């Protein structure tokens, strides 16, 4: 069963909801179906290998000490965050395709850096929006069967999970929070869109999350374009100790700029946030647009970037000061 935080209303804020659909306030909206078909008919994607066998899978610890903040990049936007005895997983996907069908759609080019059976107990699973590379039902069903996780989704996103007996599930709108033992999850704005089929576009919200735990703040951006929300997040919560920022699926810019950052924009976001450390996500596993599977990583490395912006391989971990 889905629930909402105490003290919140079912009425959605008109700031980003028109009564039927969500939207990006004071920002460009996602391209529509006409632009999508124009892109597909003119697309010239970079060539990438069918599969890259360079992942060394790792086994995370069951938990970390109170003074540690450990991040493990599993793949794509799936990250295991461990701190103060708590384990949190973001946008988990272990499927072979980011698709509603097992035989068509973007195919996995690298294996996950952690086997799903090697995951520790999970206190929370954060879902940023309902696209297939971020909300993967086969993976969520397996995680729900473990019966050790709370699932947190954006507004109006719980119905899909509840229909699959995935729970307990909590919905959060922008600027709402949920406190769980040991940490608090805040839902924050992102510039993106939602859709799983042709008729449900923007019927559910998209978001990022700020996780507060013992004075530390971790910002998970989900999928987002570059925008003023980064400054707003810093103003409200202070500079994050760790920011997880997407860098992939950014070409062609005429189509992708309203919904996905380019690597150089992720560096700007890192600077605006004032993050102690940032880690690149949303790259290297699924080729979702015209940029090649490793082009975002190469482009990020070509940018003037601080040493505090990390590129991890699938399965690689880092301890954040």
Image (tube, rainbow, N blue to C red):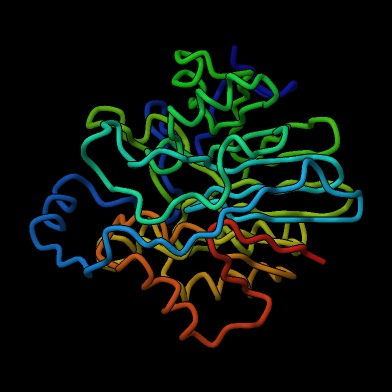
- Relative horizontal placement of residue 271, taking residue 62 as reference (left or right): left
Quarter of the image where the N terminus is located: top right
Q: Residue at x 45, y 41 (%)?
A: 134
Between 37 and 34, the one nearer to me in the picture: 37
- Relative horizontal placement of residue 241, taking residue 50 as reference (left or right): right
The quarter of the picture where residue 240 lies is bottom right
Quarter of the image where the C terminus is located: bottom right
> How many numbered tags mark residues here?
0
The quarter of the picture where residue 160 lies is top left
* Residue 40 position (above or below residue 273): above
Q: Residue at x 64, y 83 (%)?
A: 306
- Relative horizontal placement of residue 289, taking residue 216 as reference (left or right): left
* Residue 5 position (above or below residue 218): above
Between 161 and 258, the one nearer to me in the picture: 161
Q: Residue at x 55, y 23 (%)?
A: 11
The quarter of the picture where residue 138 lies is top left
* Residue 133 position (above or below residue 76): above
Image spot of residue 284 (x, y percent):
42, 62
Between 158 and 226, the one nearer to me in the picture: 158
Image spot of residue 166 (x, y percent):
54, 19
Image spot of residue 179 (x, y percent):
79, 32
Image spot of residue 66 (x, y percent):
91, 49
């Amino acid at each position: 069963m889905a629930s909402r935080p105490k003290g919140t209303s079912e009425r959605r804020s008109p700031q980003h909801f028109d009564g039927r659909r969500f939207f990006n306030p004071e920002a460009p909206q996602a391209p529509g179906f006409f632009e999508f078909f124009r892109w597909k008919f003119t697309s010239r994607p970079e060539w990438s290998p069918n599969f890259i066998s360079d992942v060394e899978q790792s086994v995370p610890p069951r938990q970390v000490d109170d003074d540690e903040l450990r991040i493990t990049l599993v793949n794509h936007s799936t990250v295991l965050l461990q701190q103060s005895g708590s384990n949190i997983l973001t946008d988990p996907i272990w499927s072979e395709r980011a698709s509603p069908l097992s035989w068509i759609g973007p195919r996995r080019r690298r294996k996950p850096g952690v086997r799903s059976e090697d995951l520790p107990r999970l206190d929370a699973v954060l879902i940023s929006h309902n696209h297939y590379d971020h909300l993967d039902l086969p993976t969520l069903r397996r995680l729900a069967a473990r019966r050790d996780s709370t699932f947190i989704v954006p507004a109006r996103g719980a119905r899909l999970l509840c229909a699959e007996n995935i729970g307990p599930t909590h919905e959060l709108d922008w600027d709402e929070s949920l406190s769980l033992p040991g940490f608090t999850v805040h839902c924050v704005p992102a510039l993106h869109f939602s859709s799983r089929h042709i008729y449900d576009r923007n019927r559910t919200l998209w978001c990022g999350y700020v996780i507060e735990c013992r004075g530390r703040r971790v910002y998970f951006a989900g999928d987002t374009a570059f925008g003023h929300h980064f400054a707003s997040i810093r103003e409200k919560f202070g500079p994050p100790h760790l920011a997880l920022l997407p860098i992939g699926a950014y070409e062609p810019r005429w189509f992708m700029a309203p919904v996905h950052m380019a690597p150089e924009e992720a560096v700007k976001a890192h600077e605006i946030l004032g993050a102690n450390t940032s880690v690149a996500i949303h790259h290297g596993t699924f080729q979702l647009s015209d940029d090649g599977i490793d082009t975002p990583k190469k482009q990020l490395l070509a940018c003037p970037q601080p040493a505090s912006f990390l590129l991890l391989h699938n399965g690689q971990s880092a301890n954040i000061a």
